[in-house]
Image (tube, rainbow, N blue to C red):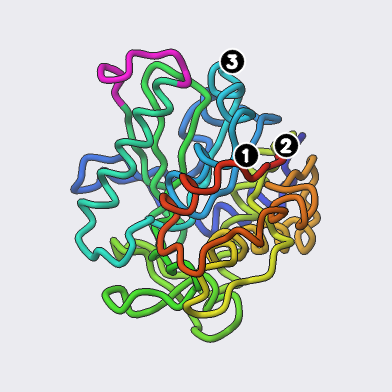
Amino acid sequence: MLVSALFYGLLQQLLVASVVSAEGLIEVADFGELGNDYNCPGGNVYFVAHPVDALLYHNPDLYHDVHTFKCTTVVVFTAGDRGVKDTSFTDSLERGLETSYNFMAGAPVNQTGWDGVKVACGDALITLRYPKDAKGLLLIYLRFPDGASGGQGYKETGQVSLKKLYQNQIQSMSSIDGEITYNLDGLKHLISIILQWKSPKFIRTLDDLTPIAKDGEYTAEHADHSVSARIVHDVIKEYKIPGNVTRQCKLYKECFKNSGLMPKETPDDVKYTVEYLDREYYIT
């Protein structure tokens, strides 16, 4: 679909001129500068809370899209840092994730390099990563702090979280690398820009129907999951974004049909997933 002149005018105001960053990544003044391989419209956009979530909750659809070289964009809300302030932990998560995408694309796992660009939106730098040999695949890292299972946040990162931002308990939130700071409206606007730029046929999110976990609650869905999904669905409604929208589950009861067997404490997603792989997830 054609993006309106109004959108391009707004985008021009938000994006700054091109420069070469100190990290060696290219900052572009317009998404269009990324080239046709990354501007492919009509593909699929996946939204996840943590780096590993797409692998856990969006397969096999994601595998099929990547392996058949469909235009695929994955937006990752948080750094998955679990309160670790040193960004090397998040960097390792992201590099491991990229290796997984190499495998799904059928590319040499340890020999396929990735490039990165930074899109400058106002004073914020959005990190985009893409494989050199698997065109059409794009990962967008927002790197907000992991909010912990109940959304209470971690002391090491100021106890901020997407849940607190969404529920107006905090006014704004910064990425762990300090390169972006958004209030809720600004974050929604950024998501709308990404969706209007990509013009996806399918928009896939996590479960926006499950209740948002309370602070310290481990028996519910991770707060980052449910809140990130709600934000995307709010954007789709508020900005009237077209496309086929699918969520992690068709019905709440289908996702938690084994809820009576859930433990009192599951302090991390890995343990939660390993112990409860018998739960059924529906994506399409």
Classify 143 as above or below 106: below
- Residue at x-position 55% and y-position 65%: 187
Q: What secondary structure is marked by label 1?
A: strand
Do labels 1 and 2 touch, CB within 8 Å?
yes
Task: Please identify the quadrant where the N terminus is shown.
Answer: top right
Query: Is 110 or 130 nearer to us in this picture?
Result: 110
Residues in magenta, as a range: 104-113
**Amino acid identity at mark 1:** Val
* Residue annotated with mark 2: 202
Mark pair 3, 2: CA separation = 16 Å
The residue sitting at the bottom extreme is 169
Q: What secondary structure is marked by label 2?
A: strand
Mark before the other along the chain sequence, 3 or 1: 1
**Amino acid identity at mark 3:** Thr
The residue sitting at the front extreme is 261
* Residue annotated with mark 1: 45
